[in-house]
Amino acid sequence: MKTLDRFLLTCGLLIPFWLLLGVWLTARAYPGYDHLQQAMSQLGAVGAPTHFWSPLLNNFPLAVLFALFAWGLARRWPGSKVALASAALVLLHGLGSLGTGWFPCDQGCAPAHPSLSQQLHNASGLLMFLSLTLASALWIWAGKRVAGSPALGRFSLAGVVGAIITVVLMAQAAKTGQLFGLYQRLNYAVSVIWVAGLALHSLRPALANRLRIATT
């Protein structure tokens, strides 16, 4: 595997760690921020103390990582239309991440009369959810037939089920006003862990070669 391909696929492995570290660091600069109750988008909301630099630390770098990983997927599985479709969806997810940072939500992120920026923010967030959930759904089939790994197919199925369950919990929490932040984090965690799993499987030939070199 070429160095460029390893680099691109490794971007997928970095995504969960960048997300965790970026949100944690940003929240530390937001007095009284509650990870269990508040949406991650509130870190970049209009009027938030972290409004300016939250997208610079979170949304924009993650958009780049998703785009690079999508490129890596396309290079890793060039002969599969399903894999290429999943790469396109991952790229769309990156564009959604860019959109949620470029168009901040209104103060509190749940106004009675949302601004245009809030509406575009919401549309970008919906694109993020749909694109990555559909991408993981494709690998339920492609896990065995493209990558030769039934385990990857089962892992992708678990990711889809987890994403759907947690988005339902998010919707309920939005109505009750309780634990929305927790369920949003669980929802995104399911998705980015799936991305990291796919990246790890895609890197297996390179990792196996390194292991053989190390043991000889």
Image (spheres, rainbow, N blue to C red):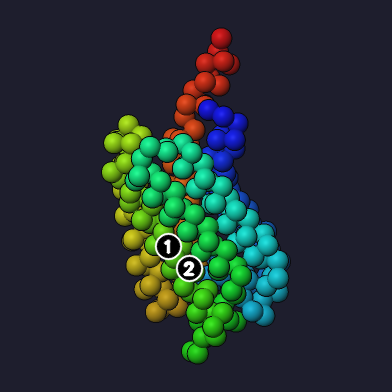
For residue 127, say whether it is visible.
yes
> Which of the labelled discs sits on residue 129, or is there none?
1
Image point (38%, 65%), residue name? 167
Viewport quadrant of the C terminus: top right
Lateral position of residue 156 relative to residue 30, left or right: left
202 over 168 or under it: above or below: above
Q: Which residue is at a point 28% across and 43% down the rendered structure image?
A: 141
Position in image of residue 206 (x %, y %): 52, 27
- The amino acid type found where label 1 is placed reads Phe
Classify residue 86 as left or right of residue 56. Answer: left
Q: Which mark is residue 125?
A: 2
- Can residue 197 be seen here? The reply is no
Above or below for 21 versus 59: above
How many C-alpha atoms fall within 10 Å of the one at disc 1: few (<14), some, or many (≥20)?
some
SS for dot 2: helix
Residue closer to the observer: 40 or 76: 76
Disc tally is: 2
**Mark 1 near mark 2, Cβ–Cβ under 8 Å?**
yes
Residue depicted at 33% across the width and 49% down the height: 138
Image coordinates for residue 161, horizontal then vertical, percent: 31, 55
Where is residue 126, by image quadrant?
bottom left
